[in-house]
Every structure is written in C-alpha cells, then in structure tokens.
Image: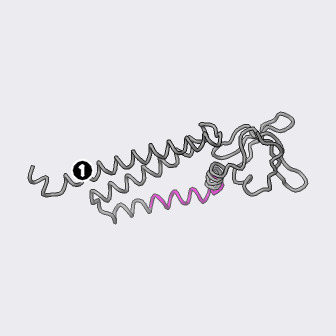
Amino acid sequence: MKAILDTGISSNIIATAIAFVIYAVLQIATAKSLKRYGQELQFPDQRVFYIKKFFKVFYVTTLLTSIVLIWGIDLQAALVILSSLFAVVGVGLFANWSILSNITASFIIFFTAPYKIGDTIRIVEGDEGTEGRIEDIKLFYLKIRDSKGQIVSYPNNLIMQKPTIIVTSE
C-alpha cells in the first residue's frame, strides 16, 4: 500500500474523482439552466436538446483532457494523435462548411430568439421571397409552411444572412 501512495496513484485517483464530480455538476447545472431558459422563451424540448448535446460533448472533451493531464500521459504523443484527428475533421468540415455554419446559426437563433415556432415570416430575396409560418426550428434548418400548405426547409445560415420580416408573432 505504501508503494501505491509513494507513486502518487492515490492523488491521481482523487483528482480524477474530483474531475468527474465537476463534470457531473456542470452537466446538471447547464441542463437545468438551458431547460429554464428554453421554457422562458417557450422553445420546444427538441430545440433545447440539441444545445444540451453540444454542451455535453464539450464537457466530455474537457473531462477527457483533464484525465489525460492528471495521469501524465505523454502529451506529445497525445497531441500528435489529436492534431491528426483535427486535421481530418477540419478537412471534412471545410468540405461541408455549410453544415458548420448552419449549426452556428442554430445557436444564434436559439440564444437570441428572433423567431419562434408559430411566427409568420417573410424572407426577402430580391423580387421574390419565402413567406410562411414557422413549423419547427431544427439544428440545420427552419421548416416553414407557405400559403399553399407546402413545407419549405430553409437553412439556418441563410435565414441569418437574408433580411427577414416578422409578419405576425404568437
């Protein structure tokens, strides 16, 4: 037992346990805060779910990084692996930049709440445009029901770039 204490393994176990406790507290506090915020602005649960998922991925990544640092894993080797992984992911995201921009726009729409489900909006696009009632706000697009009853999927990044008029608000 003395050999275990001398090597600092018990302090690593305690630090790891503390990291897990901090992770759990942050996860619970963030989930409650986002739920309360979503209820105040009358967002559907599915919309809040996407934002919670983002924070969960961020917290898990932070937790894993903390554990790597606590246990003293060779950082150079870990950084080579991570940089290679980020390079591959970066190329994939660059190839699909619109996916990333749609997710970013979704976060902006969530936190600024310029539109709500049930609002009737008009998106100005030159002489034409899109007008209809917002049926749903997804991670990548808005579902808008036009006057003909058709559902139009409008990308979040485009709605942030185009002038949008709120015709009626619920």
Q: Residue at x 60, y 60 (%)?
A: 94
In the foreground, 82 or 108: 108
Q: Which residue is mark 1?
A: 13
Q: Residue at x 49, y 61 (%)?
A: 87
Relative to 12, 143 lies left or right: right
Q: Is residue 131 above or below residue 127?
A: above
Q: Residue at x 70, y 39 (%)?
A: 136
Relative to 75, 1 lies left or right: left
Farthest residue in the left direction? Answer: 2
| Image coloring type | one colour
Q: Is residue 77 magenta?
A: no
Relative to 33, 140 lies left or right: right
Q: Residue at x 63, y 37 (%)?
A: 44
Q: Is residue 36 above or below residue 124?
A: above
Farthest residue in the front direction? Answer: 40
Q: Looking at the figure, which quarter contains the C terminus?
A: top right
Crowding near the residue tagged with mark 1, few <14, some 14–19, many ≥20 C-alpha atoms within 10 Å: some
Q: How many marks?
A: 1
Going by the numbered disc 1, the residue's amino acid type is Ile
Q: Secondary structure at mark 1?
A: helix
Image coordinates for residue 39, horizontal then vertical, percent = 60, 39
Q: Is residue 89 magenta?
A: yes
Magenta residues?
84-99
Image coordinates for residue 152, horizontal then vertical, percent = 77, 41
- The dominant secondary structure in magenta is helix
Image coordinates for residue 34, horizontal then vertical, percent = 54, 44
Farthest residue in the right direction? Answer: 127
Image coordinates for residue 5, horizontal then vertical, percent = 13, 54
Farthest residue in the top direction? Answer: 149
